[in-house]
Image: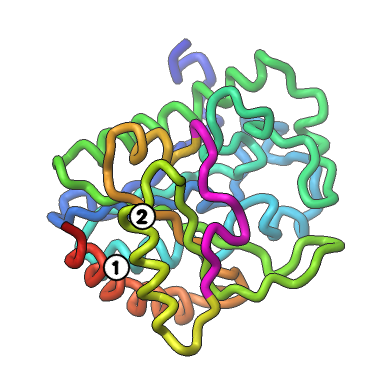
Amino acid sequence: MTRDDFGPDFGPAFHITGAARPGRWLITCDHASNRVPQAVGGGCLGLPPEDMARHIAFDPGAQGVTLALAEALDSPAICSDFSRLVIDPNRGEDDPTLLMKLYDGSIIPGNRHADAAELARRKAALYTPYHQALADLAARRDDTVIVAIHSFTPCLRGRAPRPWHIGVLHSHLDTRFSLPLIARLRAEPDLCIGDNQPYNGHLPGDAIDRHALLPGRHNTLIELRNDLIATEAQQVAWANRLAPILTEVLSGLK
């Protein structure tokens, strides 16, 4: 199956910014967009606009931080260009949540009857091209460091509020970069830092596993609380705050 089999209605799977920048960092944003391609339900999953604006459809604010951070580090960035509800690029190919039918109390009507053939269609049009582009960018130099930018909602429905400003997620298979980063961030007196919060950092087959853990690249995943990055000014401010901290931590690694 080739992209020509889908017609023109899926649109781009990703956008790359700063591909020629020389820095060793690669800043990724797996959940950058809430776009539903025309090829999927005519561009609608059957959810109201307020749900499509929530964290269930994408990571609000994460794309702006990603682009500003990549610029500050003089390095490339890659951002997905489809909603995580269409297919989730931060899941393994066999993960049961690759195509969600219920998320944080919202049923996804456009996914209710999606079968294996529909999953394969979305995967070939969006998921696979995104990961191929990410792999190509990561391979542009031997010492690439991958920083994945995500955001999290301050409170899931029916759950306690989340106190962290930033969560640093990491796998037990590679803590070389993340643990020093957590220590450095905790030295900032105004920040509450989560260590593998609000999520566990090890998810077999996810983007970090695939592009960093398996090839042995330095990596970390940063989760920012989305109410702190709601505006462009906030996104740029957080990127400018994080860039020198990331650089400092990397310089301290042997």
Percent across and percent down for residue 176 are 31, 53
Residue at 48 percent across and 80 percent down: it is 234
Q: Which residues are magenta?
A: 193-205
Figure quadrant of the C terminus: bottom left
Q: Taking 128 as reference, is 137 above or below it?
A: below
Write down the quadrant of residue 163 in the picture. bottom right
Q: Taking 83 as reference, is 178 above or below it?
A: below
The residue singled out by tag 1 in the image is: 246
- In this picture, residue 163 sits left or right of residue 72: right
The residue singled out by tag 2 in the image is: 147
Q: Nearer the viewer, residue 105 or 16?
A: 105
Query: Magenta stretch: dominant SS?
Result: loop
Q: Amino acid at mark 2?
A: Val
Tags 1 and 2 in contact by the CB under 8 Å rule?
yes
- In this picture, residue 114 sits left or right of residue 199: right
Residue at 46 percent across and 37 percent down: it is 13
Percent across and percent down for residue 155 are 74, 67
Residue at 41 percent across and 29 percent down: it is 129
Mark 2 element type: strand
Residue at 26 percent across and 75 percent down: it is 244
Q: Amino acid at mark 1?
A: Leu
